[in-house]
Amino acid sequence: MAPDPLDMLGDLPDWPGSRPPKNRTKSVPVALDTTNGARSKMYRINGEDIEMFSIGEAARALGRTASTLRMWENQGWIPRATYRSPAPRKNQLPGKVPKGRRLYSRAQVEFLKDCIVRFNLDNKNSEHWEAFKTYAITHWPK
């Protein structure tokens, strides 16, 4: 992992000049963004608020495309999405049943991020794809 660029600044204050500002509160450390800027939404599922990512936002968090996640589902490499957003009220395409968008929990996205590193899935010629498939199916978070 690359070093934090802010570490180069050392013990420098976070304000210009020699005196701290009078109206500024203490600085709060910034949390690391583990989702590559992907935005989540809160959904109420069985009376509990759960942070969920749409398939596009989950793909952004993983550094992949939504079609890649769909392909992983269709190939059986990961289980089908457990949750979906509410279906649209009208039929979008004639002859197709309206469904909501696939939703992934934060635990599922973090699990996939871990798998990408663990099984070297950035290398398309990796020999670990079968191991990834069995691991993902057996350890998939709910």
Image (cartoon, rainbow, N blue to C red):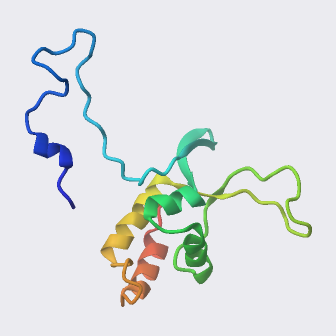
Residue at the far top: name it.
22
Residue located farthest toward the front when viewing the structure as drawn: 17
Q: Quadrant of residue 76?
A: bottom right
**Tally of numbered discs:** 0
Residue at point 25% right, 34% down?
29
Residue 43 at least partly seen: yes
Foreground residue among 125 and 115: 125
Q: Is residue 3 left or right of residue 137?
A: left
Tell me residue 32's x, y (percent).
31, 46
| Residue 142 in sight | no
The residue most toward the right is: 94
Left or right: 136, with 21 as reference point:
right
Q: Position of residue 37 (x, y in %)?
A: 44, 50
Q: Residue 72: horizontal and vertical position, in percent? A: 55, 77
Residue at 19% over, 24% down: 15
Q: Is residue 83 above or below residue 64?
A: above
- Quadrant in which the N terminus is drawn: bottom left
Indicate the quadrant where residue 65 lies.
Answer: bottom right
Q: In the drawing, does residue 39 fall left or right of residue 129?
A: right
Between 66 and 47, the one nearer to me in the picture: 66
| Residue 3 screen position, x and y as percent | 17, 55
Residue at the location (58% across, 83% down)?
Answer: 75
Location of residue 8 with respect to 108 vertically, above or below: above
Q: Residue at x 61, y 69 (%)?
A: 80
